[in-house]
Image: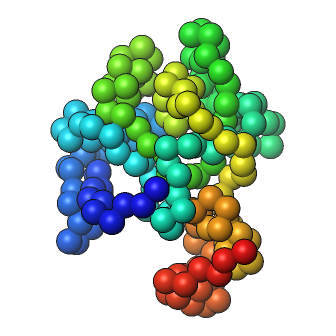
């Protein structure tokens, strides 16, 4: 899956030279704020789109149409309270509709259909409660193919792991701890990705 003519759109925070949809912060509930941004995009632009965050890196090997799951959704005590709350709410919603409980919270881009997204979130009181939008959307609108994988977010400048993720999944996600001198240098040279 390659995107030579992709149109990048930000929702909310404006980035110079990038198409933007204005969307003020909805509230301080992260899941609700992200959902509001995605629904705003779906209403204003429509069609299919790839949802991803600003810390994602992708290659032509990305298969956003075959989402990555890390097993079933489960509440884990060591996670922060807001994460456990989002997990609980997501599981309860999916159980109510007798849907699968795949955990698609793998920090990987996913293909979303605007009409299906809007219809799905008509069923949930998303404005007041934390939740996981990708796991709700994808379990309610299960694609023909999904794949077992890992969370592709890197918290350290582990370059061999980053290269493995790009080879395997065509994507990875980073955070501030990745941006050491070594990590920044590797990202600047991403035009070449070693093949297995």
Task: Say above or below: 2 vs 195.
Answer: above
Residue extending farthest right: 77
Percent of width and height locating residue 76: 79, 36
Q: Residue at x 49, y 25 (%)?
A: 141
Quarter of the image for residue 176 reads bottom right
Residue for point 60% across, 23% down: 89
Q: Position of residue 85 (x, y in %)?
A: 63, 30
In the image, taking residue 9 as reference, residue 94 lies left or right, namely: right
Residue 189 seen by the camera: yes
Q: Is residue 16 above or below residue 67?
A: below
Residue under the point 64% across and 89% down: 182
* x and y percentages locating residue 61 in the rendered image: 54, 62
For this view, does 67 lie left or right of residue 81?
left
How many numbered badges does the structure rendering display?
Answer: 0
Q: Nearer the viewer, residue 141 or 84?
A: 141
Q: Looking at this view, is 88 or 18 the one in front?
A: 18
Position of the C terminus, as image quadrant, is bottom right
Tell me if 177 is positioned left or right of 77 in this view.
Answer: left
Q: Work out whether 173 lies above or below 32.
A: below
Q: Give the colour scheme shown.
A: rainbow
Which of the pair 82/182 is nearer the observer? 182
Image quarter of residue 183 = bottom right
Q: Is residue 107 above or below residue 114?
A: below
Task: Where is residue 20? Give x, y as percent.
Answer: 21, 56
Residue 14 in view in this figure: no
Instruction: Residue at 49%, 44% (x, y): give it.
Output: 65
């Amino acid at each position: 899956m390659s995107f030579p003519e992709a149109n990048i759109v930000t929702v909310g925070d404006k980035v110079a030279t990038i198409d933007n949809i204005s969307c003020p912060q909805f509230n301080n509930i992260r899941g609700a704020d992200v959902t509001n941004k995605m629904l705003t995009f779906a209403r204003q632009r429509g069609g299919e789109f790839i949802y991803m965050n600003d810390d994602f890196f992708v290659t032509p090997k990305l298969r956003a149409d075959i989402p990555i799951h890390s097993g079933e959704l489960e509440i884990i005590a060591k996670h922060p309270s807001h994460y456990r709350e989002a997990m609980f709410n997501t599981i309860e919603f999916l159980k109510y509709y007798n849907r699968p409980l795949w955990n698609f919270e793998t920090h990987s881009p996913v293909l979303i259909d605007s009409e299906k997204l809007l219809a799905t979130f008509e069923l949930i009181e998303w404005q007041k409660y934390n939740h996981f939008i990708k796991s709700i959307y994808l379990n309610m609108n299960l694609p023909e193919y999904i794949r077992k994988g890992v969370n592709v977010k890197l918290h350290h400048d582990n370059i061999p792991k980053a290269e493995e993720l790009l080879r395997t999944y065509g994507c990875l996600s980073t955070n501030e701890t990745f941006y050491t001198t070594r990590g920044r240098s590797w990202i600047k040279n991403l035009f070449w990705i070693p093949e297995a």
